[in-house]
Every structure is written in C-alpha cells, then in structure tokens.
Amino acid sequence: MTASFFLTNLISSALLFPLNLILPCALGLLLRPRWPRTGLSLSAAALALLVIFSTNAGAWLLIQPLEQQHAALRTTDHQAQAIVVLSGARTANAPEYDNHDIPGAMTLIRLQYGARLHRLTQLPLLVSGGKPGGETEAEALLMARYLEQELATPVRWQEDKSNNTAENAALSAAILRQAGVTHILLVTDAIHMPRAVRVFRQTGIEVTPAPTHFLSRKPWSLMDFLPGGEGLRRSNYALHEWLGLLWYKLRYDT
C-alpha cells in the first residue's frame, strides 16, 4: 500500500459517513461547558443527520440525482465498437475460492451486465482496474478470469494499471485508440456513471452510458425509513461520488 493511497483514504474517512458527523457531534460536546446552546445544537444536528442518512429514504436524497443523469440502456441504436467494464474493488482471500482474491460484489454486478451486453451486441470487452492497495493481482485480471471461467465471456483487453476512475479512463483510452476504437459502451454503477462518463469523454472517447445497479428505483416501504447499516452504506457511496465529482471538476476539468 502506497503512502498516497493511505492518505487519500484517511482524508476520505474524515469526509464520509459516519465520521463526518461524529466529529461535529464530538465538537459540540466539547463546546457545551462554555457555549451550552451552541454545543447542544451542533451535537443534536449531527446526530439527526446521521439518523436520516442511515435510512434508505435518506440515502435516496443523495442517490437519485446521480442516477437520473443517465438512464438505463434501452436501445441498440448506437455505433459503439467495444464495451468497457470498470472495477468496483475486490473480495480478498476468499476461502471458498481457495483463498484467492475475487471480484467484489459491486464488480460482479457490473461483470454480469457487461457479459449480457456482449451476448446482445457481440462487441469486444475491455476490463479496467489495477492494484490500488498494492495487491499481487490486478483487479482487471480477476475480472477477466471471472468473465471467462464463470460467465463464458471472452475478454479482449485488460487495463491493469489504474488506481482510480480518472486513470481507468486515461489508460483504457490509450488501449482503445491503439485498437482503433473511438466509441464505447461504458458499464459501471448508475451512481458512479456521472463521474466515469465525465473523465472518459475528456479523453476524446465517445461514450454511450450503460449503467447498472440502480438503487433509487426500488418501491418504497416502511423499512426504508428505519436507520440501518444498508442505508448508511448507500449514503456513504453516494456522498463519495458527490465529493468525487467536485474533486474531478477542480482537478481535471479544462
């Protein structure tokens, strides 16, 4: 694990749930002896927001504006020449797979949809993902292995050096250009798609979004208003993407 990777994750932890609300709550407690009303208000507001964003309903407030930017792919009326599937991390040391690393749950959903699109279009596949945590095998290799062995889907290219979405785009675009590919179907989660589309288009590659794993389309139930780990996980994922969009706008927009 590189120092920059650790520092990036440390900063992310402070900006994401639940630490981004635990810290102001703790600050409010520290302020109470001297400024009782201010300290109590700060702590109460932080706890209230934590409860809200621990529900699926609260997470929907962050997720829905991201997912509505790119609708599900409904037509084959496009000129795409290849399918690109982005990694969504790994499951390390899986005992049921002889202690090998395998694609994580999020990556598996993307791979399943990428395989479906390949069957429908017969377009060649590129998988993209490196070794951001310093692992032995790149995520692209895990993805290609799963597609070929479990889903009977061939992989034409592997981009195995990237550590983030911007690098996914830049390094995949270089491979695609060498193969004469200028237009792709891009597969990733619907929440992640706005950021991914932005950086891929900045490389000059034409992109038709093919989002999967929509989280804001589920019918509502009373359970969606109860706090829980799933709601907090969804909120955290969506907040990560909002912060990522802001950071990429500041760093990569020209």
Image: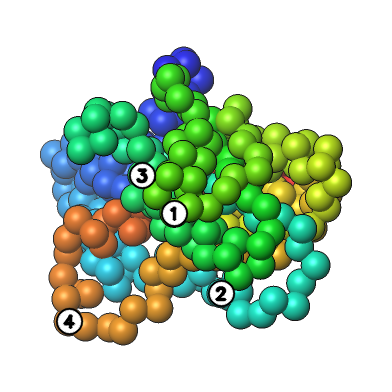
Mark linked to residue 151: 1
Q: CA distance from mark 1 to mark 2?
A: 22 Å
| 193 left or right of 2 in image | right
Q: CA distance from mark 3 to mark 4?
A: 29 Å
For the residue pair 48 and 126, the one nearer the viewer reads as 126
Counting from the top left corner in percent of width and height, residue 158 is at 61, 36
Identify the image quadrant of the N terminus.
Answer: top left
Counting from the top left corner in percent of width and height, residue 249 is at 67, 47
Mark linked to residue 222: 4
Rendered image quadrant of residue 112: bottom left
> What amino acid does circle 4 point to?
Leu
Mark 1 vs mark 2: in front: 1
> What amino acid does circle 2 point to?
Ala
For the residue pair 27 and 136, the one nearer the viewer reads as 136
Residue marked by disc 3 = 104
Element class at badge 1 = loop
**Residue drawn 80% across and 67% down?**
79
| 168 left or right of 38 in image | right
- The numbered mark, 3 or 4, whose residue comes first in the sequence reads 3
Mark 4 residue crowding within 10 angstroms, few (<14) / some (14–19) / many (20+): few
Mark 2 residue crowding within 10 angstroms, few (<14) / some (14–19) / many (20+): some
Mark 3 vs mark 4: in front: 3
Display colour scheme: rainbow
Element class at badge 3 = loop
> What amino acid does circle 1 point to?
Leu
Residue marked by disc 2 = 72
